Image (tube, coloured by chain):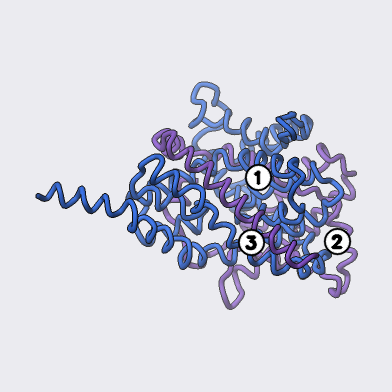
Amino acid sequence: MNALRGQLELWRLHLAVIVLGVIAELIGIRKIPFGIGAILLLPLLYAFVMAALMNPNVMPKFAKFIRQKEVQAASPLIVIAIMPFIAKFGTTIGPAIETIIEAGPALLLQELGNLGTIVLAFPLAVWGLKMGREAIGATFSIAREPNLAIIADRYTLKSAEGTGVMGVYVLGTLFGTFIFAILASVFASLDVFDPRALAMACGIGSGSMMAACTGALTEVIPGMKDEILALAGASNLLTYATGLYAGLFIALPIVEKLYNATAGKNDLATATKKEV
Amino acid sequence: MSDSVISVKTTRPKIDIADHAFTLIVVCLVGLVMNTVGPAIPIADGFVGMVVIYLISMVGLLLTRYAPFYLPSVAWISLVGIVATLPWTPGSEWIVAQAKSVNFLALATPALAYAGFAIAKKEIEVAKHSGWKLALVACLVFLGTYAGSVLVAELILRLQGV
């Protein structure tokens, strides 16, 4: 019963999660009017912010209750805490299997939409901000764990490419849920897109970002809650299955070729100049 | 979280099933509190729903550990949840009804609280050193993946006319 003792010794952590979680749930979902739509604030966002403020690494002054021991124990607990959430999403997919099959082609092909990271972010990074090879790691994917593994394997995480992917990974960990809550709120309040398309796009291979994204969507479009959950969950599962391969065989080669064909030439030019 | 970053695992991790079984109970109880407080679902209904969710997660974990081929635990758990609720699975109606008593956002709240507590020194350093350029690029990366998927899905749905 090591596990029992281990978790009991972590009572501070679990108690803090319960207290902050209850506060977050009591505050509830809030709408902030923004332009033509509204930005949705969700309990999961408050819970994250409050926990971060109690984290000794973020707020050394305030943080007395939570120690480094709890911080280290919290990391593997995220994975376990997301499991019931993933199970719940699974149970929304089964009953909606006909909706999923009907939307099958869109569901499959929208995975290619993840290459939008390259379309939007690569030009800015390389031509706008004159970034070096960091741009390759930063823009080929949304930098979740499988994508880290790809870069770690090919370039190591200490390389320039590794710096790029790690930066986006950490920024995503810290701010991804907020960004996706805002993105989904804004896209949904535009009232231009099919809610099914908005839902599928929420499945990006990260449980917490999908939670924020679908949470915002179901608030704006409550009538389609079941369909939204099912399609987002199916798309997320599809990304779990395909994300690694799409990154390795499609996205990374494209970004490398783009970089070598454009900015990489300058790199070579300056390198030869220096040699001369 | 920094540990998982440094040692990115691509091989099948050895899952201690007994350890996970207990930790998952703790996490489910925390989730049940959120489910009762926020969405105000009666605790008796929420409890049965959470038991169902727990069992789905556990079957998924067992498959992650013992299935002849490796898939990440989240993928197995999703698949078990799907198969258990397909219309032609015996008893699926009951499972669906119970799972409806569990709110998905209430389950995400504790996960994000653990995530807030898990922020490591190294991550704060990386975030600080990344600078505004990488922050700007990161925003466009997220916008790009979302907008890209929305546009492709919208186009295909319209072409299909469904």
Secondary element at image label 2? helix
Indicate the quadrant where residue B109 lies.
top right
Shade of chain B as shown in the rendered figure = purple
Residue that badge 1 annotates: B111
Q: Amino acid at mark 1?
A: Ala
**In terms of sequence position, does the residue under pointer 1 or pointer 2 come before the other?**
2
Q: Amino acid at mark 3?
A: Gln
Q: In this rendering, would A140 be left or right of B148?
A: left
| Distance from Cα at disc 3 to Cα at disc 1 | 27 Å
For label 3, the crowd category at 10 Å Cα-Cα, with few meaning under 14, some 14 to 19 and many 20 or more, is many
| Distance from Cα at disc 1 to Cα at disc 2 | 23 Å
| Chain assignment, label 3 | A
Q: Residue furthest top?
A: A61
> Among the chains, which one is blue?
A
Residue A35: image x %, image y %?
71, 30
Q: Tell if the residue under mark 3 belongs to the same chain as the one under mark 1.
A: no
Mark drawn on residue A110: 3
Secondary element at image label 3? helix
Residue that badge 2 annotates: B96
